[in-house]
């Protein structure tokens, strides 16, 4: 079959020739009703009957892979799509570097690989669960549509991981695929596997921060797994990255538009001092210091997703050829890291110090550093918006020791600039650094839905261009 074109004839669209793989096809068809039940229970609340202008992948050709059309979300064609195989691909790093890439699971790494896939898979439905109430307070039909696009694609990413589990992991894979439908974000007994995916996403600024910071962690993890010597995982992740780019676009432009509106309102009202929070809030926009606090929260939660700075699990996953580094193929070294070192921030004698660690065990730290570099680009663009409005304020990423729950800094209390405090002093200043209950209440108060075509809530500027080049008045969601 032609890998570029997706087969839409069966229940499960795919480009993996599911038609001639009876065992996996049956297994997935059996899993399908449970998935639809999950979507109906945990997917966007109140909009399952609405027609949404969504993109669906019809090809894996990077030049033209998607079509746009109105669709009811439960009828979305969630499919299994792998990027085309690279001919003669080798394991690109680790102890097996230079051996032909694996088309089957290497027995000795089976458990490790399964765990990587399950952890990735668990994040996908989790974010749908976290965002399920947001449709009701969407600031526009445009934004509502973007939310639902992200949601259906996270659903597809779950399918992507479930395919790997069913195809390559037999009975264990089937059990894991069931588990992915059983856990629930924030549930006391059966929570999702990672901390940030059990947090609430109570308002649209949180949603934009989430798609900017947490989906970007997803990007880094997918980039690292796209390098995998296990070829089906590599091909799966490569295609997921195409979709993921839109999620981060939603985050970056959503925050940018929020900032734009805040700045415009301040200029119009003649408010120079961005810290005059009360005056700014009276204008029906979100003040910049509160945006900074939201940023502090979501960035620090996202950093926790990278795990411990020094980690033998990370070393093992690399050595085995399962999980590489960000853009491994562009790096100029031996791709085995036998004698290399990498600088790691650690807590030594009560001080934060940079020390050299074996590069192999420091891979989480390295990926996290690459992530920080990636994050800072958007922050610079946001600051340009503030500057262009002539306001003296700059957003910054907080220090990596700030507000951490995992790794070196989990037991200390650091300020956003990285100074260490005692816990009581930190608690006293907490509300200056992280969103307070009052901040949350203020933002919640602004979250009034706007469902009139071409109209936007007071606190956010319209986008520069529409989705699929549609004009501003376009009815992105036909609410049922
Ligand atoms: Fe995803
Ligand atoms: Fe995503």
Image (cartoon, rainbow, N blue to C red):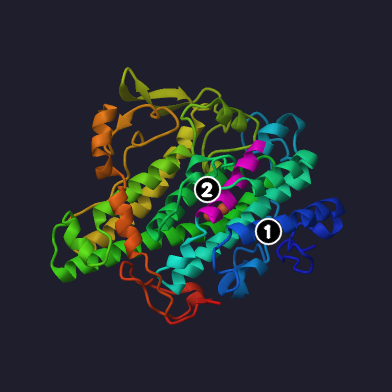
The answer to whether residue 65 is visible is: no
What residue is shown with label 2? 218
Is 41 a magenta residue?
Answer: no
Residue 206 position within the rendered picture, expressed as x and y whole percent measured from the top left: 40, 55
Q: Is residue 129 above or below residue 342?
A: below
Is residue 116 on the magenta stretch? yes
Name the residue at the front extreme. 188
The N terminus lies in which quarter of the figure? bottom right
| Residue drawn at point x = 54 percent, y = 47 percent | 185
Residue 37 is marked as 1
Q: Assess mark 1: CB under 8 A from ligand 1?
A: no
In the depicted view, which residue is nearer to us: 332 or 293? 293
State the CA–CA distance, disc 2 to disc 1.
25 Å
Disc 2: CA contacts within 10 A as few (<14), some (14-19) or many (>=20): many
Tell me: residue 76, above or below residue 17: below
Residue 372 is tagged as none
**CB contact under 8 Å: marks 2 and 1:** no
Q: Secondary structure at mark 1?
A: helix
Span of residues in magenta: 115-130
Q: Quadrant of residue 26?
A: bottom right
Q: Residue at x 38, y 58 (%)?
A: 205
* Dot 1 alpha-carbon crowd within 10 angstroms: few under 14, some 14 to 19, many 20 or more: few
- Magenta: main secondary structure equals helix
Q: Position of residue 73 (x, y in %)?
A: 61, 68
> In this rendering, which labeled residue sits more in front, label 2 or label 1?
1
- Percent from the top left, x then y, of residue 242? 57, 58
Residue 56 seen: yes
Q: Which comes sooner in the sequence, label 2 or label 1?
A: 1
Q: Position of residue 393 (x, y in %)?
A: 21, 54
Beta carbon of the mark 2 residue lies under 8 A of ligand 2: yes
């Amino acid at each position: 079959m032609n890998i570029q074109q997706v087969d839409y004839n069966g229940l499960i669209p795919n480009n993996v020739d599911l038609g001639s793989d009876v065992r996996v096809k049956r297994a997935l068809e059996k899993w399908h009703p449970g998935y639809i039940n999950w979507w109906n229970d945990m997917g966007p609340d109140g909009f399952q009957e609405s027609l949404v202008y969504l993109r669906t992948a019809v090809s894996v050709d990077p030049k033209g892979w998607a079509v746009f059309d109105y669709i009811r979300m439960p009828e979305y064609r969630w499919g299994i799509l792998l990027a085309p195989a690279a001919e003669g691909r080798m394991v690109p790093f680790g102890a097996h570097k230079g051996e032909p890439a694996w088309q089957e699971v290497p027995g000795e790494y089976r458990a490790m690989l399964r765990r990587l896939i399950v952890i990735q898979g668990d994040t996908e439905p989790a974010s749908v669960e976290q965002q399920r109430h947001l449709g009701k307070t969407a600031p526009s039909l445009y934004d509502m549509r973007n939310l639902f696009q992200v949601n259906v694609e996270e659903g597809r990413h779950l399918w992507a991981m479930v395919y790997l589990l069913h195809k390559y992991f037999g009975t264990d894979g089937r059990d894991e695929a069931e588990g992915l439908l059983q856990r629930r974000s924030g549930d006391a007994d059966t929570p999702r596997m990672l901390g940030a995916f059990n947090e609430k996403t109570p308002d649209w600024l949180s949603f934009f921060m989430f798609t900017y910071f947490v989906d970007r962690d997803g990007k880094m993890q997918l980039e690292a797994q796209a390098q995998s010597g296990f070829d089906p995982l590599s091909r799966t992740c490569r295609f997921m990255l195409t979709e993921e780019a839109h999620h981060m676009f939603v985050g970056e432009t959503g925050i940018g538009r929020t900032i734009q509106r805040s700045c415009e309102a301040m200029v119009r009202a003649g408010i120079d001092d961005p810290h005059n929070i009360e005056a700014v809030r009276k204008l029906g926009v979100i003040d910049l210091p509160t945006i900074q606090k939201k940023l502090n929260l979501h960035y620090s939660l996202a950093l926790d997703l990278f795990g411990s700075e020094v980690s033998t699990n990370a070393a093992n996953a690399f050595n085995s050829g399962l999980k590489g580094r960000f853009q491994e193929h562009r790096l100029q070294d031996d791709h085995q890291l036998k004698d290399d070192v990498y600088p790691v921030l650690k807590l030594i004698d009560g001080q934060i110090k940079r020390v050299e660690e074996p590069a192999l065990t420091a891979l989480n730290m390295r990926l996290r550093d690459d992530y920080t570099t990636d994050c800072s680009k958007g922050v610079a663009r946001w600051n340009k918006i503030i500057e262009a409005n002539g306001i003296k304020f700059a957003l910054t990423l907080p220090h990596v020791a700030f507000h951490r729950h995992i790794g070196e800094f989990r037991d200390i209390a650091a300020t956003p600039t990285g100074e260490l405090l005692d816990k009581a002093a930190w608690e006293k200043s907490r509300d200056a650094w992280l969103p307070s209950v009052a901040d949350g209440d203020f933002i919640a108060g602004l979250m009034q839905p706007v469902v009139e075509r071409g109209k936007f809530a007071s606190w956010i500027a319209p986008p520069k261009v529409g989705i699929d080049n549609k004009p501003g008045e376009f009815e992105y969601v036909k609410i049922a």
